[in-house]
Image: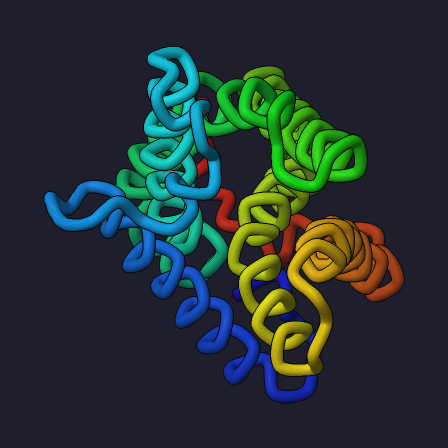
Amino acid sequence: MIIFAKWPGAWFWSAATIAASAGILLNNSIYFSSGQAPQFLLEKGHWAHEPWWLAAFYFHLVGASLALAAGTPLMFPAWTRRHPAWHRRLGYLYLNAVLWMAAPTGLALALVAKGGLWGTAGFLVAGALWWQTTWTGYRAIRRGDLPGHIRAMVRSFCWALSAPAFRVIQIALFAAGLDDGTNYIASLWLSIAASVWLAESFLYRMRRESPASIETHSPAAGALS
């Protein structure tokens, strides 16, 4: 994955990220089964019976799942250079899944998020920045700014990864004995910090390597246009 370029053991971190993302996609499938209602919906109480909330939740679930599935291959420049047509298709799928499904509904769901004010604030920050970075990436490539497109889309995909990061951190803190309420808020904000750090550390490494390196590591042949 491009975001782990120059890391020792980059292949391991890429594999771990793919595994964590696959785990999220697999977990999301339980919300479409006909069995017992998942614990998350039970915890939402009366909100799980509100039509607007349920619509927002399922749109968010589908949009975020599509974004993770479509965005992951785009983080492998060698693959996208070999398959420019698929870069374009998956890029449009990712773009629309984030801009018109996952991010807007995430903002709506944030208003009644678990964790009170801190939970609402965290999800609002994540949703707004996910939308903004994705839109910035789209606008950049439309005006022919490839480096700007790459910078924005790396940031955007790192926001998509905040979901698997949240779950991994939550499991780790649970194993450490942190109570559920504190764990939830800590996991949320740590996953936000991880997303920002992952994107900005990659961009910093690329800038230090050389001014043109962001294009060298890019899948230019398949850019949206």
Q: Nearer the viewer, residue 145 or 107?
A: 107
The answer to which image quadrant residue 25 occupies is bottom left
Q: Residue sitting at 50 percent across and 68 percent down?
A: 17
Identify the residue at the far front of this view: 46
Query: Which one is in front, 173 or 77?
Result: 173
Name the residue located 49 percent from the left edge and 76 percent from the top edge: 16
Position of residue 58 relative to residue 208, above or below, is above
Horizontal and vertical percent for residue 147?
A: 69, 39
Q: Does 4 sit above or below residue 199?
A: below
Q: In the picture provided, is 215 more to the left or to the right than 211?
A: left
Question: Quarter holding the C terminus?
Answer: top left
Q: In this view, does 132 lie to the left or right of 30?
A: right
What is the count of numbered marks? 0
Residue 168 at what x, y percent from top left? 57, 69
Picture coordinates of residue 187, whole percent (x, y) = 69, 58
Percent across and percent down for residue 92 are 37, 28
